[in-house]
Image (spheres, rainbow, N blue to C red):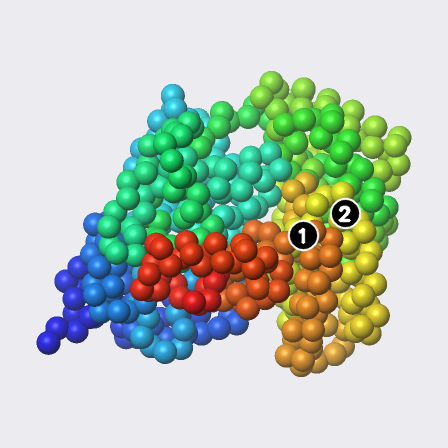
Amino acid sequence: MTSLVDTLRSCVGPAHVLDAGDLAAYEQDWRRRVRGKALAVVRPGSTAEVAAVVRACAAAGTSIVPQGGNTGLVVGGVPDASGKQVVLSLQRMNAVRSIDGENLTMTAEAGCVLQAVQEAADAAGFLFPLSLAAEGSCTIGGNLSTNAGGTQVLRYGNARELCLGLEVVTAQGEIWDGLAGLRKDNTGYDLRQLFVGSEGTLGVITAATLKLYPRPAATLTAWAAVPSMEHAVRLLALAQKRLASGLTGFEVMGDFALSLVARHYPQQRVPFLGQTPYGVLLENTDHESEAHARAQFEALLEAALEDGCATDAVVAENIAQAHALWHVRESIPLAQAEEGLNIKHDISVPISRIPAFCAATDAVLQREIAGVRLVNFGHLGDGNLHYNVQAPAGGDMAAFLREQEERVNTLVYDQVHKFGGSISAEHGIGELKVDKLPHYKSPVALSMMRAVKDALDPAGILNPGRVVRG
């Protein structure tokens, strides 16, 4: 009797079915919290091969874990410990199939690394604006399956808004070709939107048609010191009024978060460190000229200083300085890891309520856990904070994580819910938050989600135990 692994070898070729040796790159999550065990890792090279693999697994009743770059943060793309799941890696499917300049679209396969998509767009004279810290290793299929956010959601939206079409292999191994790059198609249910953000639980994304934009004439970066989160929100409103759609980035960073960068990466210069509770990183893009963009930026910052929503500010003079400022922002998670184990949150709250949320949640945590340190930073322009919690200085960080994570999560998520927010802004649900979701999602919403799952994957073979429980 032919084993499933032998059947999979016949589908994709023996060299692309891995069932021995060190498979940590596929079996361990990005944050090294979980290590599973796969029956096999299968690496198809075409959509037809993906469909054949899914059909074989469906016939055998074997569950599948779709995987892109394995950079997810909610344990949504690695196998469980049973040794019975197949990891379906899309990394070999990494071609840019076409660029349609007149339609401002690109069609790329799911395994394309995000940075490669950006570079292909740039080489053709366009911009693909999705940008996040893992762009050198995450893939476009993973970005879409988790509806990734990043630093330019304020202007261009999440991955969902950048996708005009999908090619998907269903749980039955059929291929849906929905790649037409149409901006208007009102012929029934929008199937594309079902699969974006579904974390591989409804189908396997194999390719996507993506929006492109004209490349801007200039992109400038500035850093402002602000005296409170209230002032940061005021600065955001002023920037939106002055720059309109030119405002493509607005990141807020707490001074303690920035102090970790200075401590662990002393070669980096952190502007205005220790002078104010928060720093703000702003990005302005302009389709006219750099001189026009700089004049706009300087006028904005002068108005901010006069208004009092900023106490000091600096505009990067060149690309190197701009990269250095962004590098400080991007180094916060790395510096926090250097500081020790921590409890991460990816939450969103209506922008107008963020100051009150931060004040209330800071107070609750500091009252309940003496000495707790708050690493608060994120995409204020779209209401998304990475509101992370570090153990008290000098304490046993592993013990803190083990003993306090559940309590801290409940305290933070209860506050998020109270202020009308979401417990997952851009990272997804995966396995890490699947049991939290029923506490903060309405029963009606969960019932509809389960109905969709049951309709599209009745056998429950696609990424089981993620997003919704059976």
Residue type pointed to by label 2: Arg
Query: In which quadrant of the rendered image does the C terminus lie?
Result: bottom left
Crowding near the residue tagged with mark 1, few <14, some 14–19, many ≥20 C-alpha atoms within 10 Å: many
Q: Residue furthest left?
A: 1
Q: Position of residue 379 (x, y in %)?
A: 66, 46
Residue at figure coordinates x 81%, y 58% from the top left: 360
**Is residue 390 left or right of 184 when viewed as pictured?**
right
Query: In which quadrant of the rendered image does the N terminus lie?
Result: bottom left
Residue type pointed to by label 1: Gly
Q: Position of residue 434 (x, y in %)?
A: 53, 65
Residue 467 seen in the figure: yes
Q: Position of residue 176 (x, y in %)?
A: 28, 44
**Is residue 55 left or right of 435 when viewed as pictured?**
left
Residue at figure coordinates x 44%, y 74% from the top left: 35
Badge 1 is on which residue? 421
Badge 2 is on which residue? 353
Residue at figure coordinates x 21%, y 50% from the top left: 48
Tell whether label 1 touches label 2 (CB within 8 Å): yes
